[in-house]
Image (cartoon, grey):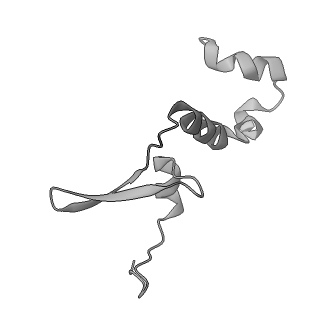
């Protein structure tokens, strides 16, 4: 991977997904023990941004193969069940 002349680099999709970095996520860089660390910026509005990010991340997951044939009620209650 190479940094462009504008200082840009593309974060691989697998890493973005694993880190929960959604499009338009504000990030900040830091140096930690000689390594560059990238983290999402926590905004002053707090929980509302976290909740929106969680909803965006979960969007479309009911289409996963494991949920095929399930009713909406069963999908909604699945996170609360011990199944």
Q: Position of residue 80 (x, y in %)?
A: 62, 14
Q: Position of residue 69 (x, y in %)?
A: 84, 28
Which residue is at the front of the view, 2 or 5?
Answer: 5
Relative to 61, is 40 on the left or the right? left
In this view, 64 is above or below 80: below
Quadrant including the C terminus: top right
Which residue in the rendered view is the most extreme toward the front? 44
Which residue is at the front of the view, 63 or 51?
Answer: 51
Which residue in the rendered view is the most extreme toward the left? 33
Which residue in the rendered view is the most extreme toward the top? 82
Quarter occupied by residue 66: top right
Q: Residue at x 80, y 33 (%)?
A: 68
Q: Residue at x 54, y 54 (%)?
A: 25
Q: Residue at x 47, y 39 (%)?
A: 44
Q: Position of residue 51 (x, y in %)?
A: 59, 33
Which residue in the rendered view is the most extreme toward the bottom? 5
Relative to 22, is 12 on the left or the right? left
Which residue is at the front of the view, 23 or 1?
Answer: 23
In this view, 51 is above or below 43: above
Q: Residue at x 77, y 18 (%)?
A: 74
Which residue is at the front of the view, 51 or 14?
Answer: 51
In this view, 10 is above or below 62: below
Kindly tell me whether residue 83 is visible in this rendering: no
Count of marks placed on residues: 0
Quadrant including the N terminus: bottom left
Kindly tell me whether residue 65 is visible in this rendering: yes
In this view, 20 is above or below 16: above
């Amino acid at each position: 991977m190479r940094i462009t002349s504008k200082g840009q680099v593309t974060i691989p999709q697998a890493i973005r997904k694993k880190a929960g970095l959604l499009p338009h996520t504000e990030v900040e860089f830091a140096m930690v023990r000689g390594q560059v660390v990238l983290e999402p910026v926590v905004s002053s509005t707090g929980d509302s941004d976290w909740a929106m990010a969680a909803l965006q991340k979960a969007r479309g997951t009911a289409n996963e193969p494991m949920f095929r044939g399930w009713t909406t009620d069963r999908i909604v209650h699945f996170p609360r069940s011990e199944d």
